Amino acid sequence: MLETGRFTATESPGVDAVAAYFPWHFFEASWGIRIYERPFYGFAADLASLAGHPLPTMLPIVLLQVLQHEWTHFAFEV
């Protein structure tokens, strides 16, 4: 079941609710970006609904947006 309805035109828990960056200097071998599957698909479904586009069309765009956000965390770290 998708976790939809959390991201609306007026409210949002933020991208950090669907993914997280685990810094290499704290997590060593297990560092990296974690994308939480259900919240991610819910986020994508909510954005697709708001944009008026089908979910399959929006998935790669939403994934890129989430990764860009997490890569920014990495960039500040190094």
Image (spheres, grey):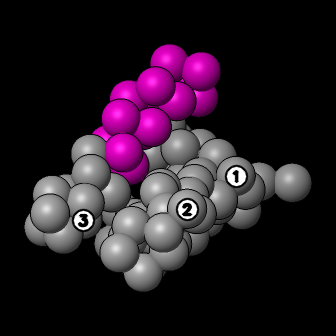
- Are dots 3 and 1 in contact, CB under 8 Å? no
- The amino acid type found where label 3 is placed reads His
Q: From the viewer's side, name the closer residue of 13 and 70.
A: 70
Residue extending farthest top:
57
Which residue shows up at 42% across the image and 38% down it?
Answer: 62
54 up-or-down from 33: above or below: above
Quarter of the image containing the C terminus?
bottom left
Residue at 38% x, 29% y is 61
Sequence order check, earlier mark of 3 and 1: 1
Q: Does the magenta stretch include residue 65?
A: yes
Q: Earlier in the sequence, mark 1 or mark 2?
A: 2
Overall secondary structure of the magenta section: helix
Q: Which amino acid does label 2 sit on?
A: Ala
Question: Percent from the top left, x then y, of residue 17?
Answer: 51, 72
Vertical relation: 27 (above or below) 50: below
Query: Hey, what amino acid is under mark 1?
Result: Glu
Q: Please indicate whether residue 28 sits to the left or right of residue 71 in the image.
A: right
Q: Give how far across and how far down residue 39 sits, in percent.
A: 64, 61
Query: Of marks 3 and 2, which one's residue comes earlier in the chain?
Result: 2
| Residue range corresponding to the magenta coloring | 53-67
Foreground label between 1 and 2: 2
Residue annotated with mark 2: 29
Q: Where is residue 18 in the image (x, y as percent from the top left)?
A: 53, 63
Q: Which residue lies furthest to the right in this view?
A: 1
Task: Identify the residue position indicated by label 3 in the image.
Answer: 73
Quickly name the residue at label 1: 37
Q: Is residue 67 above or below residue 52?
A: below
Image quarter of the N terminus: bottom right
